[in-house]
Image (tube, helix red, strand yellow):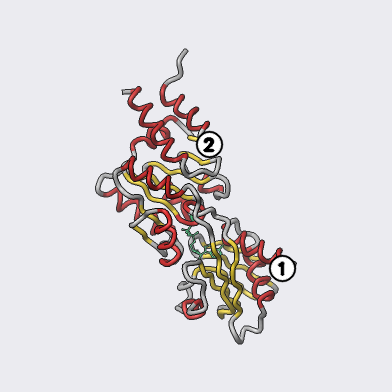
Amino acid sequence: ATMPPLLSAIANAGRHGVLVKSAVAMERLGEIDAAALDKTGTLTEGTPEVVAVRPLPGSGLDEDGLLALAAAAEYPSEHPLARAVVAAAGARGLRPAVAEDFVAMPGRGVRATVEGHVVAVGRVGQHDGIGDEAAGPGAVAEGTTVLVERDGVAVGTLALADRTRHDAPAAVAALTALTGASPVLLTGDNARAAARVAADTGIDDVRAELLPEGKVEAVRELQNGGAKVLFVGDGVNDAPALAAAHAGVAMGRAGSDLALETADAVVVRDELRAIPAVVRLSRAARRLVV
Ligand code: ADP
Ligand code: MG
């Protein structure tokens, strides 16, 4: 017997390293006429590295002290920035304390109790502007800067840098050709870091500093005009947007469990290029169905 077209398309998608979860999901991927992409872990490799550790004067911390404190709070988190902070501490031979009462705040950062102090690590600008000052002139231009607070007081910043995926420009170009519109970049990161990745990949429409609900709103707004939006993301913070989009695709290698569960398809081999390829497979299958 010959396989129904959508099922052979799913098998072919598998050869491209994309796990499509159902025939309905396969069909939706071919229906999209706009695309929106997350930045960290999606357009970028998602393996950032700590490039600067800056204790604030008066914090009583040196670089190692600040990094160990941040790593203790980040240890339970699966966020790529958290993994980078923990790895940097390990590389310096630091042994972070065990944190208690860990709370992840998707799109913002983490909070935990470390040796009796409440330690928060996260987005600059969430903290009444203290972080903006702290991140100020010394901050690495175009990177991601996170603020470290101890008992509500800023004690330092960490600068992290991440590489744009080598196949991101090609994937963006292919999605532009398939949808007739340049994809939109939706990120929780700051505008500078977002602008650099947009420039690297050929994206003009950038929305930065979005919380998870902000990504959902952006997807809904794009869909308001009747467009069917493909959203690609990897984080817990992307799960609501993956659910709101007509078709959601998660990056699988470093993707969070919640993103993988919510998405219609998962990129198992770490290639962004495979996404437009699967959209084409779906469209070809639909032509055979109708
Ligand atoms: P993106 O949308 O680019 O994938 P996220 O929404 O995951 O980024 O995060 C947005 C911002 O929130 C990050 O740039 C960072 O400033 C902060 N943030 C989120 N999670 C963490 C964390 N675990 N540690 C430090 N900062 C974090
Ligand atoms: Mg992400």
Name which residue lies at 41% across and 51% down: 37
Between 21 and 52, the residue placed more toward the observer is: 52
Quarter-of-image position of residue 264:
top left
Label 1 sits on a secondary structure element that is loop
- x 75%, y 67%: residue: 93
Q: Position of residue 66 (x, y in %)?
A: 65, 75
Q: Which mark is residue 19?
A: none
Q: Report if the beta carbon of the residue with label 1 is closer than 8 angstroms to ligand 1.
A: no
Spatial CA distance of label 1 from label 2 is 36 Å
The tag earlier along the polypeptide, 1 or 2, is: 2
For residue 17, say whether it is visible: yes
Find residue 176 and report its horizontal and vertical position in percent. Answer: 34, 45
> Residue 258 placed where, x, y %?
53, 48
Q: Which residue is mark 2?
A: 17
Which residue carries the number 1 mark?
Answer: 92
Residue 235's spot in the image, x, y percent?
51, 53
As shown in the figure, which amino acid type bears the numbered disc 1?
Arg
Q: Is residue 124 left or right of residue 29?
A: right
Label 2: element kind: loop
Residue farthest along the top direction in this orientation: 1
